[in-house]
Amino acid sequence: MDVAMVVWRQWLAGHDRLRDALPAVPLVVIAAAATAVGESSWHEPRWDETAWTALSCLPLAVRSRRPLGVALVTLAAGLTLMVLEPDLAPAPSASLVALYTLAAHGSRRTAWTVGLAAAVAITGVYAATHEESVVGGASLLRLDFAIAATALGRAVRSRRDHLADARARVERAERMQEEEARRRVTEERVRIARDLHDVVAHHITLVNAQAGVAHHLMRAHPDRAYEALAHIKDNSRAALDELRATVGLLRQPDDSPGTRAPIPRLADLDSLVGGFRASGMSVWVARTGTCSPLAPATELTAYRIIQEALTNTHKHASATRTAVVLHYGAHRLRVTVTDDGLPGSPRGAGTGHGLMGMHERAVAIGGTVTAGPRPEGGFQVVAELPLSLHPAVV
């Protein structure tokens, strides 16, 4: 039964004129039955009055397209029928359908203006043609019919508008969710790209430097060359571990925890610096202030900034000494990486992605990064990072 109703409604939706004219069928049937009712028995309907009712229903075929015009035409036809045939008991039914349609499709002001005017006109004509009081029961019943048709149309219109607003809110919420999901995916993609850049640039730089040392010492000092090869092995393993940890962020929540390596922290700074020292770079580390617990995001950001700064120094500056200073303040951690090298070494200039990545990392947790050459020579990177983060940021 429900399927049949759905099919019927879909079919009517594609035939709007037939749908608009459909109420005329029961109206004509009721009009014919009303003229066939006698005082004591049924008799043959008065076909002329039935034909007049059917004729007055013809404008209903375009009631959805011209609701105001159809309401006025059917009202005029109904009032004319009431004047010519005062014994016809039913109210001008076609005009009631037209008033309902006008209220359901037109504006509230127009609907109630025409509806009230039609109610007064129908009541007045009925009272005059039947010599009854305007406030009599039969007259007021016609008044109620017109007002009820208008009220019903407005109720349907209000419900339709409410459903449309609800659908619009749902669609707007879905669009906002999709936009938020795309924004989060983009941010995560950029963050993972920064991690991959930091890991690959750092470890490949160290492996390249240590491979050069091993090549240079292979014949003259094989023991030292063997030591450089051991450092290459350690750095390549560390690179694989960090790449596994970074790519592990893309895994599903139900993946095995053992497949994810822990993210680097400042506790791993000695190991990081040791790799640079093994490649022949002189690095000095100092900590000042009172060491306070740091948010995990702050620790990772500080570690990556130091890693990128040391990598840039090794790749793009002929430095003899590099200093890393971590100063723990009351609310912020200051990370300073200073070298005494000369920019523009033959190793080649950078692309700028490393400095951009450091800045993006710091800004993401509410910090800042400044970087540039020093007047006395060398290059300096200074990062100001919050010790703790708001839960929503973390």
Image (cartoon, rainbow, N blue to C red):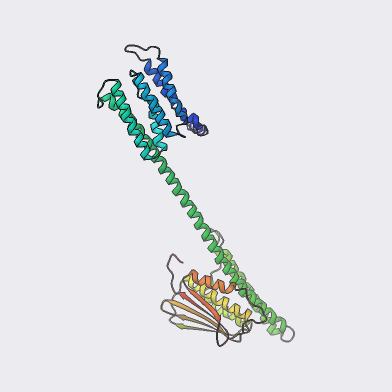
Which residue lies at the image location 33% right of the left edge and 17% below the top edge?
Answer: 87
How far across and how far down the image is residue 285, in percent? 53, 83
Residue 283 in picture, x, y percent from top left: 57, 84
Locate residue 282, reporting x and y percent. 59, 85
Vertical placement of residue 196 versus 62, above or below: below
Q: Residue at x 51, y 81 (%)?
A: 336
Residue drawn at 34 percent across, 13 percent down: 38
- Which residue is at the front of the view, 11 or 66? 66
Q: Quadrant of residue 193?
A: bottom right
Query: Foreground residue, 202 or 293?
Result: 202
The foreground one among 294 and 193 is 193
Q: Is residue 106 something one can see in this rendering?
A: yes
Task: Give the number of callouts.
Answer: 0
Q: Is residue 255 above or below residue 318?
A: above
Judge whether residue 241 can be spotted in this image.
Answer: no
Q: Nearer the viewer, residue 116 or 151?
A: 116
Question: In the rendering, at what x and y percent does residue 312 appear?
Answer: 60, 78
Q: In this image, 128 relative to 9: left or right?
A: left
In the displayed orientation, state which residue is furthest to the bottom.
Answer: 376
